[in-house]
Image (cartoon, helix red, strand yellow):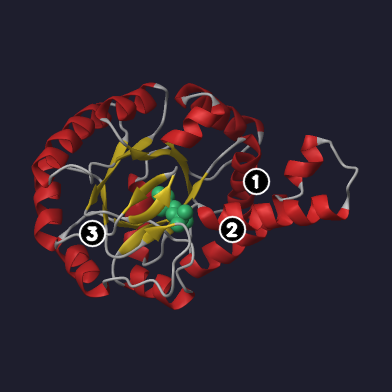
């Protein structure tokens, strides 16, 4: 059964660790992530971007696949199926209608007042369905799903205003992280992160987890981060493994062997990541 993220992130905030959001791209990734997290006995959030949902055939395909996989593979850990960066109220509602247990409404491209109005509409709809909602303040930088974004850091005042007027369940304040690989050292604003965390009762989310060194991940968790999103890192280790496999065997053509040649790379990387996050049940 799918669950929203409230219980798992509440425990993470109290226990000073982070729950991973791993983005999924296809059936195989979903299976590898579920199997590995189940083996490690840790909760997991499966992130699905709008682009990835479209690639897989739509929200209903994704939701049905994940729910069937949980049953068929006898997955016993808490699993949250989360729309990543929902760009419109309609898309968030469509994901909820299709059975997603959580959504992010990314209103960061709108002025704050509009971001608040639209986020509130998503929260009202989501909470009727027991679905959790994450929102964004400021702009997280980098490129995701071919959309480029400049960094614009969040302020405590804007975060409080959005929280107080919407009732969101978690917040992703942009504080210097970027999607994709970093050019140089990530420059995260831990001072503002701590201020926001101290003033807000809800868990904070760090996007752009790929490429953040271990010490900065640990500092982020110590300063109030309870959920960390990872996408590019798993894509990179998977592609490297598949490329090496194809280079080694020029005659292989069975797609199960080709795609599956990246399985261990994904599973090993998940192990490393959640060890750093100190994820627990
Ligand atoms: P990365 O691709 O940098 O890991 O970021 C993922 C993310 O934040 C998804 O929302």
* Mark 3 element type: loop
Specify which label sits upstream in the sequence, 3 or 1: 1
Residue 226 horizontal/vertical position (percent): 35, 59
- x then y, percent, for residue 137: 21, 52
Find the distance from the CA under tag 3 to the CA under tag 2.
29 Å
- Labelled pair 2, 1 in contact (Cβ < 8 Å): yes
Residue under numbered circle 1: 32
Q: Is residue 124 left or right of residue 96?
A: left
The answer to whether the residue labelled 3 contacts the one labelled 1, judged by CB atoms less than 8 Å apart, is: no
Q: Position of residue 85 (x, y in %)?
A: 35, 41
Residue tagged by mark 3?
152
Which residue matches tag 2?
270
Give the class, few, some or many, for how many residues have Cα within 10 Å of label 2's Cα (few <14, many ≥20).
Answer: many
Q: Residue at x 30, y 35 (%)?
A: 87
* Nearer to us in this view, 118 or 1: 118
Lateral position of residue 69 relative to residue 126, left or right = right
| 73 w.r.t. 19: above or below | above
């Amino acid at each position: 059964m799918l669950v929203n993220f409230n219980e798992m992130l509440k425990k993470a905030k109290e226990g000073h660790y982070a729950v991973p959001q791993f983005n999924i791209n296809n059936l195989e990734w979903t299976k590898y992530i579920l199997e590995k997290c189940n083996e490690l006995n840790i909760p997991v959030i499966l992130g699905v971007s709008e682009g990835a949902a479209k690639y897989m055939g739509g929200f209903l395909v994704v939701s049905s696949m994940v729910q069937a996989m949980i049953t068929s593979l006898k997955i016993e850990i808490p699993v949250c199926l989360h729309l990543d960066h929902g760009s419109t109220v309609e898309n968030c509602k469509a994901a909820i209608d299709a059975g997603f247990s959580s959504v992010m409404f990314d209103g960061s491209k709108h002025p704050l007042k509009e971001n608040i109005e639209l986020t509130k509409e998503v929260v009202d709809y989501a909470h009727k369905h027991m679905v959790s909602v994450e929102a964004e303040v400021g702009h997280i930088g980098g490129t995701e799903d071919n959309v480029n974004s400049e960094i614009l850091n969040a302020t405590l005042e804007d975060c409080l205003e959005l929280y107080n007027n919407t009732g969101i369940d978690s917040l992703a304040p942009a504080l210097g992280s970027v999607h994709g690989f970093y050019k140089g050292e990530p420059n995260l604003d831990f001072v503002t992160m701590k201020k926001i965390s101290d003033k807000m009762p809800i868990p904070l989310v760090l996007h752009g987890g790929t490429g953040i060194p271990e010490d900065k991940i640990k500092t982020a968790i110590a300063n109030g981060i309870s959920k960390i999103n990872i996408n590019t890192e798993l894509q990179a280790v998977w592609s490297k493994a598949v490329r090496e496999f194809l280079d080694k065997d020029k005659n292989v053509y069975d797609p199960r062997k080709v795609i599956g040649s990246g399985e261990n790379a994904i599973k090993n990387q998940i192990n490393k990541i959640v060890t750093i996050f100190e994820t627990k049940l």
